[in-house]
Amino acid sequence: MRAIKPAQIAVFLALLAAILTLALLTTSLLGELPLGDFRGVALVFAAVLLVYLYAFLVYRAFLYALPLQQGVVPEHTRQELAANVNILFYLMLFNSLIRTHFLPVPLQRLVYLALGAELGANTYSAGAILDPPLTRIGSNTIIGHDATIFAHVIEGGKLELKAVVIGDTVTIGAAAVIMAGVRIGDHAIVSAGAVVTKDSVIGAGEIWGGIPARRIKAAALPQ
């Protein structure tokens, strides 16, 4: 695994300081409101909520300035800075949101949208989307409980980013793993516990399962 450079950590810490400063300043303004007997609890809750709201804004602004680029990430480049600061955001802030079962699934959808995922109408994930800016999912698709989708490849010192694209009306079974670069066509099914290896292409209507996942059969497509 490639080490994150001190300069990249410094950039993340500067962004984190900005997030905390904005959250504290806004909380102090809220402190002037008549909050009654639960003033302390209300302010703590507001501070935590504001930290995440400002984190979403700062994170998206950072990616607007330095977007993640698909392909092998060379060392000592702007691409590596963007990729590693992105990793730090998830390790330090967002992992607690996307890996928890505390948030209701509809609220989890809003979190993924805030983090840059493209999710079609009526698409929900009860699993973890680890790279939302590189994940595109169509409409009426369900990601099962504890399934994992990620769009990065870490092999020794190699770091590579590859988008995951999933079509409409797809079912990803519970605890399935969808690796970087995978393409899944409309109406496909990935069975529970399957591991779809990187760069696999699942055709429309196909059913895949196993470790590593292989085509089991072609499903009947709707007329």
Image (cartoon, grey):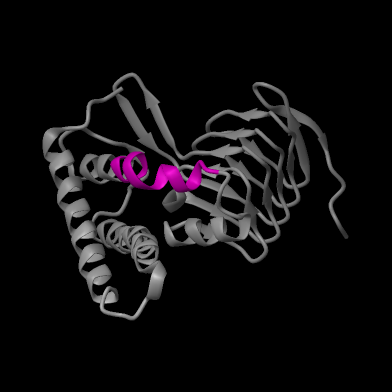
Q: Does the image show residue 131?
A: no
* Residue placed most toward the observer, 212 or 28: 28
Q: Residue at x 27, y 68 (%)?
A: 27
- Quarter of the rendering occupied by the C terminus: bottom right
Left or right, residue 62 beside residue 216: left
Could you tell me residue 130's position as x and y percent?
A: 47, 42
What is the quadrant of residue 19 in the picture? bottom left
7 w.r.t. 14: above or below: above
Taking the magenta stretch, the answer to whether it contains residue 97 is: yes
Residue that sits furthest to the front in the current view: 37
Q: Residue at x 36, y 57 (%)?
A: 48
Could you tell me residue 154's position as x and y percent?
A: 38, 27
* Residue placed most toward the observer, 219 or 101: 101
Left or right, residue 115 beside residue 199: left
Could you tell me residue 30's position as x and y percent?
A: 29, 75
172 w.r.t. 157: above or below: below
- Which region shows up in magenta? 88-100
Taking the magenta stretch, the answer to whether it contains residue 92 is: yes
Q: Residue at x 24, y 44 (%)?
A: 79
Residue that sits furthest to the top in the current view: 156
Could you tell me residue 140's position as x and y percent?
A: 71, 59
Our reading of the magenta stretch's main secondary structure is helix
Left or right, residue 174 beside residue 67: right
